């Protein structure tokens, strides 16, 4: 086991730079999730840690060793690919034993390790099958098994669950998490699914267009997003945003959003009087307004009950706002509704830079 | 009648949309064309077989039915095997075909792998050039090659053929294998790389086992081509005991303008037996490599 340190790493393909100086320190035994929209460079970063891609600039350290020039097989990492990359011509047993065989492990030790890994993952009955004879979930497990038999310093996962159906994905998510708690091997996990990131990670690295937007524990990112990108990316349904100008006018401030609509602000924003900002509020932080409470008026557009909660989409100042209610209300599309933001949950971001104020 | 539906289903071996096609219709659209093809393709073999077992007097007697034999004989085969060098020609052909095939496949595997999977400047270009080499007809190439063969003192030895056949075989096999290697997912090799395999181990333990069908089809192609090759064998070999079957049958069994039709046909028929055997062994692989690649 080892820590992984990524220091100002850059990557160019030809003349195009796709990673613009990324630094992340991953502690020993930590489970870090790289998350971001498609094409932001997550896989590229992971492949640089694995040694499959050359590092254009900067340094990557595994343990105390700079691995920039170290070939993949000497980095002592194991990787699980999105499409599993099981060797089709080898049985499950041989798939799992392959890396140990290459390392010249002695037969007894090899057998013991493969069987132990198979036991952990519940693959013992499948050892004699070929990959094509397995279901998607089983293949996924074999891919994991192939990684854990080696007992590497670092596990790398590149969207390992994205080929599974929704239910299996949730189940495997838990299994991977449990496996990590059991083995405590440093893990880097790539996904574009923020729920996967939130549920699995010790710490999340949010990437966007080749840079790191924010690094932090899941709830920290949720509560204190550093900018509009992180705020919009973490959390589902996503945070509502509206542009406007802060008006302090003596008492508790308001946000003027144009068209005569204004949103209530709590205390402490008066310093930003007159400043153009982006106002952000999460759907779960909008409640039904009590009489006299500062609120905004909207027209109900869509009502989506899911059973446990109800998603309400309403139109305010020309934009769509989502709100989530745990309690049941008799909403009808076309009716008007008064929504009150929880004032201490409101986020304000600079309109130009998107940075949190 | 008391039929069990499950058994009924099991006996129904038609596939997919076959049920839409009635029997008479299938006769016309499927079996009749196939029959025509078969007749056209197999007629030469019938003629060879027939001629090779006709006694000489029947061969020249125009009053008899040319499509049939009245009094079959194995005299021509006997003559061919005992009185001529036929067994030696057979051995020569076998030696040349097998060695040249092995050489070419070994070279093509490495060339194709390097072109497809090792990233270096100009790899696509090299691939294109190799295919271009395939387009140069052997009937032109044999003139410069003859010079080379002479200079190295290989004239009239099996080595002359073993070393020149790959010039035809390697380009095509390389090209065929390139297509095959491309179909193997990159991730497999990357995974093997992380698992600790060297390039050579990736080639021998991942890529080759997965390309067996491709290699077999390249091999069959190369073997057949060597076996039937005529121009080089005619030009580079002069003495009877070094000749290959296709050339020898023609040059040793035809004296002036006298065609010894019986032995000639017997020789041609025997000569096609090894190719048939090779095909029948590998036909499954051959077809599957033409129709599909690696499936997980
Ligand atoms: N071999 C390559 N050559 C050129 N550009 C590449 C190459 N690989 C990736 N890129 C570019 O690098 C950027 C990042 O790609 P990457 O695969 O890391 O994205 P990602 O975050 O993993 O996206 P996804 O979630 O879709 O997998 C993309 O813009 C992509 O076009
Ligand atoms: Mg990716």
Image: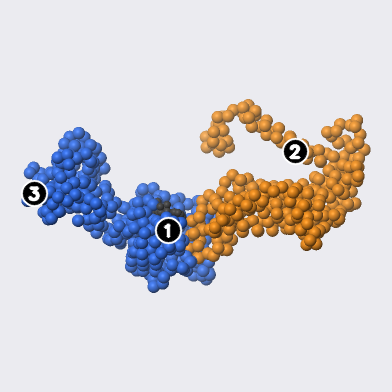
Chain colours: A blue, B orange
The answer for which chain carries disc 2 is: B
Q: Across the whole image, how many numbered discs are drawn on residues?
A: 3
User: Which of the 4 image quadrants contains residue B46?
Assistant: top right
Q: CA distance from mark 2 to mark 1?
A: 61 Å
User: Which of the 4 image quadrants contains residue A75?
Assistant: bottom left
- Residue name at image x 56 percent, y 56 percent: B122
The answer for which chain carries disc 1 is: A
Taking A306 as reference, is B146 above or below it?
below
Residue B191 visible (yes or no): yes
- Report whether B132 appears left or right of B271: left
The answer to the question of whether label 2 and label 1 lie on touching residues, with beta carbons closer than 8 A, is no
Q: Which residue is mark 3?
A: A249
Taking B17 as reference, is B124 above or below it?
below
Using the rendered image, report if marks 1 and 3 lie on a common chain. yes
Dot 1 falls on a residue whose secondary structure is strand
On the image, the x and y values in percent for residue B165 come to 73, 54
Ligand 1 closer than 8 Å to label 3 CB: no
Of the numbered discs in the image, which one, if any, rests on residue A150? none
Outermost right residue: B57
- Residue name at image x 54 percent, y 33 percent: B17
Q: CA distance from mark 3 to mark 2?
A: 100 Å
Of the numbered discs in the image, which one, if any, rests on residue B42? 2
Instruction: Looking at the picture, tell me which residue is in the foreground, B18 or B196.
Output: B196
Instruction: Looking at the picture, tell me which residue is in the foreground, A193 or A243.
Output: A243
Characterize the local packing of mark 2: few (<14), some (14-19) or many (20 or more) Cα atoms within 10 angstroms: few
């Amino acid at each position: 086991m080892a820590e992984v340190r990524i220091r100002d790493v850059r990557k160019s393909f030809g003349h195009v730079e796709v990673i613009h100086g990324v630094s992340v320190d991953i502690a020993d035994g930590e489970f870090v999730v790289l998350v971001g929209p498609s094409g932001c460079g997550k896989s590229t970063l992971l492949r640089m840690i694995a040694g499959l891609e050359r590092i254009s600039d900067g340094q990557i350290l595994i343990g105390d060793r700079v691995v920039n020039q170290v070939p993949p097989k000497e980095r002592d990492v194991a990787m699980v690919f999105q499409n599993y990359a099981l060797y089709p011509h080898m049985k499950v047993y041989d798939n799992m034993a392959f890396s140990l065989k290459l390392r010249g492990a002695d037969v007894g030790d090899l057998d013991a390790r493969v069987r132990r890994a198979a036991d952990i993952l519940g693959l013992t009955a499948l050892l004699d099958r070929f990959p094509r004879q397995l279901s998607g979930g089983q293949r996924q497990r074999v891919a994991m098994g192939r990684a854990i038999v080696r007992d590497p310093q670092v596990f790398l996962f590149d969207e390992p669950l994205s080929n599974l159906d929704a239910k299996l994905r949730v189940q495997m998510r838990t299994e991977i998490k449990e496996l990590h708690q059991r083995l405590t091997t440093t893990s880097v996990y790539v996904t574009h699914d923020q729920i996967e990131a939130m549920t699995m990670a010790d710490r999340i690295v949010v990437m966007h267009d080749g840079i790191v937007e924010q690094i932090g524990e899941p709830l920290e990112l949720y509560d204190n997003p550093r900018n509009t990108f992180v705020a919009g990316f973490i959390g589902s349904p996503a945070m509502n945003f509206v542009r406007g100008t802060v008006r302090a006018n003596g008492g508790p401030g308001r946000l003027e959003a144009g068209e005569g609509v204004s949103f209530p602000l709590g205390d402490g924003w008066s310093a930003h009087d007159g400043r153009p900002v982006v106002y952000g509020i999460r759907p779960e932080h909008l409640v039904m307004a009590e009489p006299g409470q500062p609120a905004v008026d909207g027209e109900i557009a869509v009502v989506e009950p899911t059973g446990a909660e109800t998603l309400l989409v309403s139109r305010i100042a020309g934009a769509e706002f989502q709100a989530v209610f745990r309690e049941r209300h008799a909403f009808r599309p076309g009716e008007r509704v008064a929504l009150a933001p929880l004032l201490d949950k409101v986020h304000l971001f600079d309109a130009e830079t998107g940075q949190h104020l | 009648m008391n039929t069990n539906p499950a058994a009924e289903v099991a006996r129904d071996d038609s596939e997919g949309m076959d049920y839409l096609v009635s029997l008479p219709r299938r006769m016309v659209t499927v079996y009749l064309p196939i029959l025509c093809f078969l007749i056209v393709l197999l007629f030469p073999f019938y003629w060879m077989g027939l001629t090779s077992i006709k006694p000489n007097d029947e061969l020249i007697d125009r009053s008899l039915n040319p499509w049939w034999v009245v009094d079959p004989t194995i005299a021509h085969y006997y003559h061919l095997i005992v009185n001529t060098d036929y067994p030696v020609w057979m051995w020569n052909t076998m030696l040349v075909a097998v060695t040249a095939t092995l050489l070419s496949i070994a070279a093509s595997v490495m060339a194709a792998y390097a072109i497809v999977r090792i990233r270096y400047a100009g790899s696509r270009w090299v691939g294109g050039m190799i295919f271009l080499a395939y387009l140069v007809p052997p009937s032109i190439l044999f003139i410069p090659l003859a010079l080379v063969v002479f200079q190295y003192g290989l004239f009239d030895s099996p080595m002359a053929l073993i070393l020149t056949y790959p010039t035809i075989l390697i380009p095509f096999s390389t090209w065929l294998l390139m297509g095959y290697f491309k179909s193997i997912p990159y991730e497999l090799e990357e995974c093997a790389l992380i698992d600790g395999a060297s390039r050579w181990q990736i080639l021998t333990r991942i890529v080759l086992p997965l390309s067996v069908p491709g290699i077999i089809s390249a091999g069959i192609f190369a073997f057949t081509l060597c076996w039937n090759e005529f121009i080089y064998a005619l030009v580079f070999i002069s003495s009877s005991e070094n000749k290959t079957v296709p050339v020898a049958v023609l040059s040793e069994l035809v004296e002036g303008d006298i065609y010894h039709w019986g032995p000639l046909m017997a020789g041609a028929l025997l000569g096609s037996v090894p190719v048939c055997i090779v095909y029948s062994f590998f036909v499954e692989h051959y077809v599957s490599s033409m129709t599909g690649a690696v499936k997980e």
